[in-house]
Structures are given as C-alpha cells and as structure tokens.
Amino acid sequence: MNGEGRTLHRQVEAEDAGSRLDKWLTTHLDTTRSQVKRCIEERWVKVNDETVKAGYTLHAGDKVVVRIPEPVSLEAEPQDIPLDVVYEDSDLVVVNKPAGMVVHPAPGHQGGTLVNALLAHCSDLSGIGGRIRPGIVHRLDKDTTGLIVAAKNDRSHRWLADQIRNRTMIRVYVALVSGRLNDDKGVIEGNIGRHPKDRKRMAVVDEGRPARTYYQVKERLARWTLVECTLDTGRTHQIRVHMASIHHPVVGDPLYGSSAGGLHAPHQMLHAQQLRFIHPHGESMQFCVDTPPSFQAVLEKAQSSP
C-alpha cells in the first residue's frame, strides 16, 4: 500500500462493548477483513491513542482511529523469464525456483516474479489465486530455492490445496544451520505469528498459529549442521523461525540469522528438495532436485573448514 489513503475515526457504542477489535472494524468500516488485518499488523490502528492487538476487547466510549492507505494496483503480467520446469501436464506445473525470485507480485516486487514467468510460459493457470497469484497453491520465500507446484485449473488448485490443508502433501527441505545440533532428529513445535516489535519478522509467540517442523541431521560439520526439515504445517518463514528459536539459525538468513561462524553465503541456505503429493488423476507424484551450485559451494566451504 502507498499514498495518503484515509484516516477514519470511530467511537465504540455501548452495544458493541465486549467485541474483538478486528471483528468490530470489519463490521463497522467500509473495508475488507484482509485490510483490517494488515492495518492492525502494521500498527495503523490505535485505540485511545495506543496500538493494540487484533483480539483487544473493546469498551464503550473507546476512540478508534485507523489509517487505511490507498491500495497499490497490482495485476500480474506475462514476462519472458526462464524457468526450470521439472514436470508439467494439463493440470499442474512443478518448477525448481532459483534464489532471488519472489513467487507473486507484491508492493516492491511488481515484476520478475514466478507468477509473471508462469503466465508467459503457460496461460492456463487457475484463477483461484486472483489476478496477483494465479495458480499459486503454496509459496517459497524469495531466497529459498527449490520445488514449488502451481495449478493450471481450479479443480487442480482445490485438489492440491486440500492436501496442504490436510497435511498430506510432503515438503522436505535441506538447510545448513549455524552450530552443531546434539540430537540426531527432533521436532520443533511453537506457534508462529507476527513479531511483536518488528513487522517484517515472524516469531514464536503464544498468540500465533500452531506450527510443527521435523528435522533430521544429515551431516555435522565444524561449526554448522546440515539438516533435513519436513513441514507438518506451512507457516510463513516456518523453518527459518523454528531453527532460530532453538539457536540454530539458517546460514545466510538476513532476518533470523546471527553469526554464521565466519561462513559467507549469498542467500539463505534453505532448499525445498523434495515434493510429494497425489495428482488430481489419482497417481502418486514424487520430485527431488539437488541443491543449487550456490548452496553447494557454501556447503563445501563448511565441509573443508577445520
């Protein structure tokens, strides 16, 4: 969002006392639930001159001020960008995404995204994601490499989305993390939500959404560990947040990393290596791609470090 937008002032009436702030805003303001959520997360909503959380309980007489910036007009356009297509048929396409590629247009990234490339490669993407995210069933962070599947029609989109929702689509990542993990395998559980002080980051917070990550050590190095992570849930930045929460951040992660033990990485060392799901026609599909040369080069430096 950008521009001046508009600022709205409302006072809570007695009959609305006890309501949650987010639900009250959605009902009483001429805006959408997604805008309300964004405004609260961005701290553009104040109650009695103080920023509060979405679940704040309103009281009669509370003065609510909300700033709603003008929305940026976004619509994905086809762009002739090379794609590493791993598999494709009339229902879906599986791509090996490179580092540095954003999945879909967003403020600050209106072009050069995976969606722009897909629209040029195949015009028959599902419409469920709208004009900005056509065909997008799940996402990878900008600097995470590896496998992502997009749907070419609405039936396939719903089919694949149901597998993510039911946790039957298997997504396995490989990551190089700082420090040496003691346990050969484990599970990290912790609710993930917006960081209370830094809106660009996620964090393990009580009010977040439940999240679970399984990990298994693949190789222990001098000051790092190569791990395989399997998602049970798929929250924003999940592996990055969970590994950082146990003090083993992903090497090269600009948001959640700390000292990488002197190891320089051009991007975060996180790669979506395996993807398994059931095709809309019923057959089991499994894909696996090697880590990119940039990942391999950093790993080799770590392996040769005393």
Image (tube, rainbow, N blue to C red):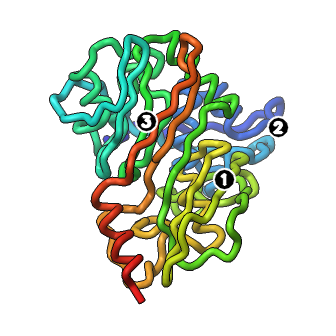
Left or right of 48 on screen, residue 85 = left
Residue at the spot 45% in from the left edge and 81% down from the top edge? 259
The residue shown at (57%, 72%) is 248
Q: Position of residue 124 (x, y in %)?
A: 33, 12
- Residue toward you, 149 or 288: 288
Which three-letter amino acid code belongs to the residue tagged 2? Answer: Ala
Circles 3 and 2, Cβ within 8 Å, touching? The answer is: no
Q: Which mark is residue 17?
A: 2
Pointer 3 or 2: first along the chain:
2
How far is mark 3 from mark 1, CA to CA?
18 Å
Q: Residue at x 60, y 45 (%)?
A: 235
Q: Earlier in the sequence, mark 3 or mark 1?
A: 3
- Front residue of 84/46: it is 84
In this rendering, position of residue 17 left or right of residue 293 = right
Would you say residue 112 is visible in this rendering?
A: yes
Q: Closer to us: mark 3 or mark 2?
A: 3
Res. 73 in view: no
Look at the numbered disc 2 and give the secondary structure of its residue: loop
Label 3 sits on residue: 148
Mark 3–mark 2 distance (CA, rounded to whole Å): 45 Å
Residue 87: quadrant of the picture = top left
Q: Residue furthest left?
A: 80
> Number of labelled discs?
3
Q: Which residue type does callout 3 highlight?
A: Ile
Contact between labelled residues 1 and 2, with CB atoms less than 8 Å apart = no
